[in-house]
Amino acid sequence: MSLHPAEIAREIRAYPFFSSFDETLLLQISTMVRPSEFQHGEVLLSAGQSNDTLYFLRQGTVEVLVDNEKVNELSQNGEVLGEMSVLSGKPASATIRAKTKLECFAIHADDFAHVPPNQKDRFQFLLYRIYAGILTDRLTKTNEKAKMYEITARQLERAKKEIEVVSSAQMNFLRSESKAPSQNVLLMEPNKKQQNMIKTAVGSTGVYLHLCSTQDEAQAAIRDKSKNFDVVFCDETSMDFLRWLRDVNFQGEMVFLQSTKKDFGPVQELPFVQYVITVDSEDRAGTVKSLLTTLTKILNKDYFGLEKYLAWGTDTKTKVAKSSKDREGLRQELLSYFRSLGIRSALLDRVQVAVEEMLMNAIYDAPVDSEGRALYNHLPRTETIELNPQEEAILRYGCDGNMMAISVRDSFGAISRDTVLKYFSSCYAGAAGSLNENKGGAGRGLHQILESCDFTIFNVKKGYATEVIGLFDIEAAIQKRDSSPKFHFFYIK
């Protein structure tokens, strides 16, 4: 249907593109406008081809395609199409295709030459001002989309990582030798949201998980002899229940869930609890992995080895420290290995601090005589020590692409649960070194390990071995690191 220029002028007056045009200029432009129609699937502009026409949407929806992928849809009345190629004189950068039946107004760029000479300068000024406004608006929208894309990409990456972490922990559990159906676990957790999350993760392993919200429920479950629980998990809200378990001579294992806040008071009141693991209520993947890894270790009675914290099949390196002089060479070899994997230097700075403290502890602090008396920890750390074969320290390390792990193991198992927790407590209370009088170290070694690592694991079997494992999240941004300590402590009978 043909339209009179006056009718066209009345309609386009509402379009943002023409909002600055006066009535006279608007009528002149209206004589250049041609109504056009396109059917579903028809192409208005083709990427890579020249274009000399401006289109203004009247009705319908168009798709914007780049490399045959849809990047946008436009349907707003008065939306301008093709302005970039008309303005630049270059081929169109995108294809525009009708998604529905389409009605447009079209103006050929050549028609602008017919503007009366006395209006031409003003018309050109208006035209370029309009183009500038359109480009600014498009840039703003592009920036907003880029921001949303970045946010979405981060969310997807975080979700992907959580799935990988949880799946890896579940697969490690299933690969273990545990007879999952015959093992029973009780978790004391008043938070229903946390209960559902843990039930979903742990339930998939085949372990029978009994969730309790109150102490009465938990005590009733323990009294039910048909269940015969192997492991009980509790946090600081359930300390009375843990003491009750001790009093009734509970034969299973007790695990204390330590909040990531820097308060070691509650767990220090429970010296009979052998296992302490930190949990972060905001870190779903980390909590699930902590629980599954802990279950794997306890139920299989297989505590040592950094492989449990890496993806299955990860290559690991093993080195031996026979003297205090070996520290520098071993540290440089470890750093060179991680550099060859592309690990950034800022992360390696933390690794370097941790491995140095681990080796110092294993060489100077760990060795004891048959009476349990320390052999070398009174010496300055600058004094060279040659270790006997039974005193040698084992350094191991590996990387699975998401997490780096380092560990140092001695052959003594002399450090106690209380010593570790007291050192941590004194350091975070600002009293570093107060427990280390008359010793060669500065009293901050354990604290520095904990602060340098994203996660620290202590495996201790008295008279047999102490293994300290440090984990480093490769993707975590340094400026967003949580300063709260995250660790596992296993004091093995």
Image: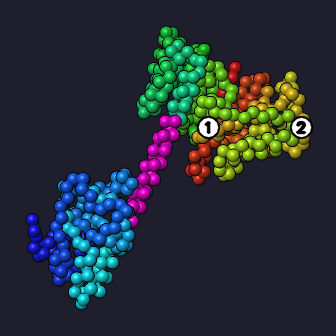
Looking at the image, which is closer to me, 340 or 410? 340
Looking at the image, which is closer to me, 424 or 1? 1
Determine which residue is flagged by label 2: 385
Q: Residue furthest top?
A: 226
Q: Is residue 71 above or below residue 183?
A: below
Q: Which residues are magenta?
A: 135-164
- Label 1 secondary element: loop
Q: Residue furthest front?
A: 49
In the picture, the quarter occupied by the C terminus is: top right
Residue in the picture at 66% in, 27% down: 490
Q: Is residue 212 left or right of residue 434?
A: left
Labels 2 and 1: the sequence-earlier one: 2
Looking at the image, which is closer to me, 29 or 475? 29
For residue 400, which numbered disc appears in the image?
1
Viewer can see residue 187: yes
Q: At label 1, which amino acid type do we have?
A: Asp
